[in-house]
Image (cartoon, grey):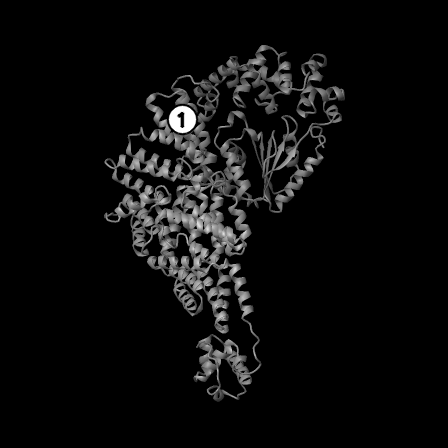
């Protein structure tokens, strides 16, 4: 072990073990913590120096001055491999915009984080594993931290080891590796001085030990007293007070500027010529404060200590001078803005425009937190009155991405003052979306209504687009649903054409029409008109509303076509929320088709896409679909654990989409044996549907599950009431799937021969649809009903089909129920006589008795002639006959032929 890394063998072994876990396919994040100078960087440097071939190492060092540089840490990490990655087309789109500042317009920050994750995965595909080292992570920019957290939370099998070096406490989801002080003997080895004294002076800190070694070599008597005390910053300042004034002045300038490759900058800032500045740098370098052959501090703690020693007025004077100096030399606006952020408002114009330019650059890179910070400081300057409104709008738009509540406040403040119709529409749409994400649908409806009324005389298309959003959100909130329903009734009597605004409103009208019940055909017609492929395609919520109607109407193939096209458009535009909306619809489509594995996969992709810091409203649809699919996969406990992660709020619980949560939790509770809890959730869902005025039996189907729960609780009267209601509403809606589900529920509740007929009707209604899972549920109930009626062979047929369908869908619970049912229906078969024949033997015998040849029978039943001969031989033996002639006289069961 080198002299600089004493007493760290255990920590190195711990990092080796973490890397072994990563190489085995488990992503890991380790917080290496300890006070400044304790050796975090030296430990990780020694660890990475001995890594095996094929392990990629990427490093970044954070600086307080660069805290607002959007994706600054990500840029540092990927800089060594970026050129090669671009050449290999690994880095494109939002990720490229973040890393290179490519001029691709404002970027969705979550699309950038997602793009960087994809880039990281692709990069790791070319390496055995990767180690990302972020030194002084406490100064990392928020955008990079968001990306690193996304990697941590959403990609647990990535062969990636994140090493975050910083002072501080442990953090959930991360391993913790604290570094403590060195012993007296180790400090004596590093300093060459008296162990007890040197340990007392340095506190066991290796960095201080190195500086003390240099101090002892130069002037032990004077400098030991300068090192008195264990507070490093004060000790260093005492020590520097012995340097000539010009050296201290140069150190101040360098501490304010941060690392630089241009010696002219610290020289100019410290008001000295290049030669004099060079001599000062050499003196600082000789004491170990500066790195060899560079204008950078040998440790960040040294710069921090010097910076802390600059008095407040002097510090502001230097930052102001640095900002002007960097402006004069044409430095990047982020560098200039870093100094402006540390200055009080001055009432000048030029800082406003510099900060606005920095905000624009941060927005372009997908770093809205940095943009918002610049804009808040620009507003404090303050800007000229004529420009203030535009800055408030820009701030609201920046905040909307990650802090919708703050964004909503600023956008609401600005909206009433805007004159330009296009800006009013754009701001109202973002403001409405912010309020929806905050589960404040009623406020969103009011904002959209007021703005639409203002715009109607000026821009009819913009007003129609806002009307559509208002109607879509209005039908989903209890406080606005009645008014939205009345609006939908009024709009049905208006002729709407094919302009984009009118089609958007048609889609919202289709959505409202479907939710409030009635025949499916008019709603589906409106939805098809809204999604007409000959016109400009709709996007986001405007596209989602009519696609939901197509799914509820059973037009799944057409719905899938529009879903795939909308996802492609959202990917091209870089909108994460638009992608998430349509991926939720793709999961719903898979669920409607009974594709449980695809439902789970797509719902999880949606969660991976949505940022961890965005909770509530956007998560409810994919969450409900995922939980229901887990229930059907016979994993109700896993579904309940997933649902327990939702943090409810009064506003969230007042929204329509909370019903999908209640339905999923109700089903999961029923499946786990909690009848009371499950029924409570399902009935609460029904009460909310009633308050909203929604009558669509497909959105959501709570009655069929609640009726089953009542039956299990031996409450047939209550079950019957729900079943009758469901059948009435399904008849009104008129689709095969809705009627099939309702007939199944009514048949289950009714029982007897009438119930059996209804179950058979349900199977007939569901067979032409794509609802394989619902068909399997019906056949399971039908099989059990046939068993109860003594129709054992027909019961076996239904249950065998259930097993096949359940296997195809991935419905483990249904498959298990079918297996149990088949076992219950397996009564002992006699050795001879008609009852001894299998279903296949009965069918072959019936066809032979009707004169079919062996070849005809084989072709009809999909068998070989040899198999037909074998079945006939077995039949002759069991019936005690010698050939075909005896079949016509024998009491042969025809097997349903």
- Work out whether 350 lies above or below 152: above
Q: Specify whether residue 626 is in view.
A: no
Is residue 238 left or right of 510 when viewed as pictured? Answer: right
| Residue 116 appears in the figure | yes
Give the image location of residue 70, x and y in percent.
Answer: 47, 31
Residue at the extreme top of the image, as rendered: 245
Pick the residue in front: 414 or 369: 414
Q: Position of residue 580 (x, y in %)?
A: 43, 45
Q: Quadrant of the C terminus?
A: bottom left
Residue 500 at x, y percent in the picture:
29, 44
Q: Is residue 886 above or below residue 619?
A: below
Q: Tell me what residue is drawn at x 66 percent, y 34 percent.
A: 46
Q: Residue at x 50, y 73 (%)?
A: 792
Asked where in the image residue 771 lies, by quadrant, the reply is: bottom left
Based on the displayed image, in which of its 4 quarters is residue 453 positioned?
A: top left
153 or 246: nearer the viewer: 153
Residue 640 x/y as whole percent:
53, 49
Q: Nearer the viewer, residue 340 or 74?
A: 340
Which element is circle 1 on? helix
Which of the 4 image quadrants contains residue 721?
A: bottom left
- The crowd level at tag 1 (other Cα within 10 Å; few <14, some 14-19, many 20+) is many
| Residue at 53% over, 59% down | 813
Closest to the observer, 398 or 477? 477
Which quadrant holds the N terminus?
top right
Residue under circle 1? 356
């Amino acid at each position: 072990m080198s002299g600089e890394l004493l007493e760290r063998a255990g920590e190195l072994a711990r990092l080796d073990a973490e890397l072994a876990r990563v190489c085995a396919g488990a992503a890991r994040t380790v917080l290496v913590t300890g006070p400044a100078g304790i050796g975090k960087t030296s430990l990780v440097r020694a660890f990475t120096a001995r890594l095996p071939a094929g392990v990629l190492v990427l490093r970044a060092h954070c600086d307080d001055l660069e805290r607002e540089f959007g994706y600054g840490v990500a840029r540092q990490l990927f800089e060594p491999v970026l050129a090669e990655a671009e050449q290999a087309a690994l880095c494109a789109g939002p990720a490229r915009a973040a890393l290179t500042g490519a001029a691709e317009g404002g970027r969705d920050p979550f699309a950038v984080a997602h793009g960087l994750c994809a880039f990281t995965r692709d990069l790791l595909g070319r390496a055995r594993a990767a180690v990302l080292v972020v030194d002084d992570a406490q100064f990392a920019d928020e955008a990079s931290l968001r990306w690193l957290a996304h990697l941590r939370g959403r990609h647990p099998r990535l062969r990636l080891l994140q090493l975050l070096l910083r002072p501080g406490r442990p953090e959930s989801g991360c391993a913790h590796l604290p570094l403590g002080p060195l012993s007296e003997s180790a400090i004596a080895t590093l300093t060459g001085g008296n162990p007890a004294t040197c340990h007392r002076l340095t506190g066991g800190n290796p960095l201080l030990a190195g500086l003390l070694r240099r101090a002892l070599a130069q002037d032990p008597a004077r400098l030991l007293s300068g090192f008195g005390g264990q507070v490093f910053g004060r000790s260093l300042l005492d020590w520097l007070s012995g340097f000539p004034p010009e050296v201290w002045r140069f150190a101040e300038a360098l501490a304010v500027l941060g690392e630089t490759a241009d010696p002219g900058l610290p020289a100019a800032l410290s008001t000295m010529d290049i030669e004099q500045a060079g001599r000062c740098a050499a003196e600082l370098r000789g004491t170990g404060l500066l790195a060899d052959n560079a204008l950078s501090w040998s440790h960040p703690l040294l710069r921090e200590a010097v910076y802390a020693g600059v008095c407040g007025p002097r510090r502001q004077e230097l930052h102001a001078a640095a900002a002007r100096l960097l402006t004069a030399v044409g430095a990047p606006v982020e560098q200039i803005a870093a100094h402006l952020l540390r200055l009080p408002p001055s009432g000048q114009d030029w800082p406003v425009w510099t900060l606005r330019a920095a905000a624009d650059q941060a927005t372009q890179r997908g770093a809205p937190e940095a943009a918002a910070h610049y804009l808040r400081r620009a507003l404090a300057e303050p800007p000229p009155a004529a420009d203030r409104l535009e800055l408030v709008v820009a701030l609201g738009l920046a905040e909307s991405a990650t802090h919708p509540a703050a964004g909503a406040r600023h956008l609401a403040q600005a909206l009433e003052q805007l004159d330009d119709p296009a800006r009013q529409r754009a701001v109202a749409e973002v403001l409405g979306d912010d309020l929806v994400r905050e589960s404040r649908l009623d406020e969103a409806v009011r904002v959209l209504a007021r703005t639409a009324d203002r715009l109607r005389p000026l821009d009819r298309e913009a007003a129609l687009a806002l009307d559509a959003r208002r109607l879509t959100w209005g039908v989903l909130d209890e406080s606005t649903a009645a008014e939205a329903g009345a609006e939908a009734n009024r709009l049905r009597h208006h002729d709407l054409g094919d302009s984009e605004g009118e089609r958007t409103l048609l889609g919202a009208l289709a959505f409202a029409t479907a939710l409030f019940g009635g025949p499916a055909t008019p709603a589906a017609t409106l939805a098809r008109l809204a999604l007409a492929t000959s016109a400009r395609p709709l996007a986001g919520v405007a596209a989602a509303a009519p696609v939901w109607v197509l799914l509820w109407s059973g037009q799944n193939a057409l719905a899938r076509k529009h879903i795939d096209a909308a996802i492609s458009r959202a990917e091209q535009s870089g909108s994460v929320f638009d992608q998430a909306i349509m991926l939720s619809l793709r999961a719903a489509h898979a669920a409607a088709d009974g594709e449980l594995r695809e439902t789970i996969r797509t719902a999880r992709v949606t969660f991976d896409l949505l940022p961890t810091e965005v909770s509530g409203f956007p998560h409810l649809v994919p969450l409900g679909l995922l939980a229901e699919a887990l229930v059907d996969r016979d994993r109700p406990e896993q579904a309940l654990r997933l649902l327990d992660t939702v943090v409810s709020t009064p506003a969230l619980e007042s929204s329509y989409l909370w019903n999908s949560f209640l339905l999923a939790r109700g089903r999961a509770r029923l499946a786990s044996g909690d009848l009371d809890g499950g029924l409570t959730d399902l009935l609460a869902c029904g009460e909310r549907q009633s308050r909203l005025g929604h009558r669509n039996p497909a959105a959501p189907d709570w009655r069929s599950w609640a009726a089953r729960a009542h039956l299990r609780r031996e409450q047939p009267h209550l079950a019957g009431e729900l079943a009758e209601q469901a059948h009435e509403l399904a008849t009104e809606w008129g689709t095969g799937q809705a009627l099939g589900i309702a007939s199944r529920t009514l048949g289950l509740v009714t029982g007897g021969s009438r119930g059996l007929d209804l179950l058979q009707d349900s199977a007939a209604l569901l067979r032409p649809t794509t609802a394989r899972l619902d068909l399997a549920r019906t056949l399971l109930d039908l099989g059990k009903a046939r068993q109860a009626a003594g129709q054992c062979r027909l019961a076996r047929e239904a249950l065998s089909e259930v097993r096949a369908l359940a296997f195809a869908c991935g419905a483990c619970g249904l498959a298990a129920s079918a297996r149990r049912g088949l076992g219950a229906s397996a009564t002992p078969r006699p050795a001879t006589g008609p009852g001894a024949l299998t279903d296949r033997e009965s069918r072959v015998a019936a066809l032979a008795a009707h004169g079919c040849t062996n070849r005809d029978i084989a072709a009809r039943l999909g068998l070989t002639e040899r198999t037909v001969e074998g079945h006939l031989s077995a039949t002759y033996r069991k019936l005690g006959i010698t050939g075909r002639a005896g079949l016509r006289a024998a009491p042969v069961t025809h097997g349903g032929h």
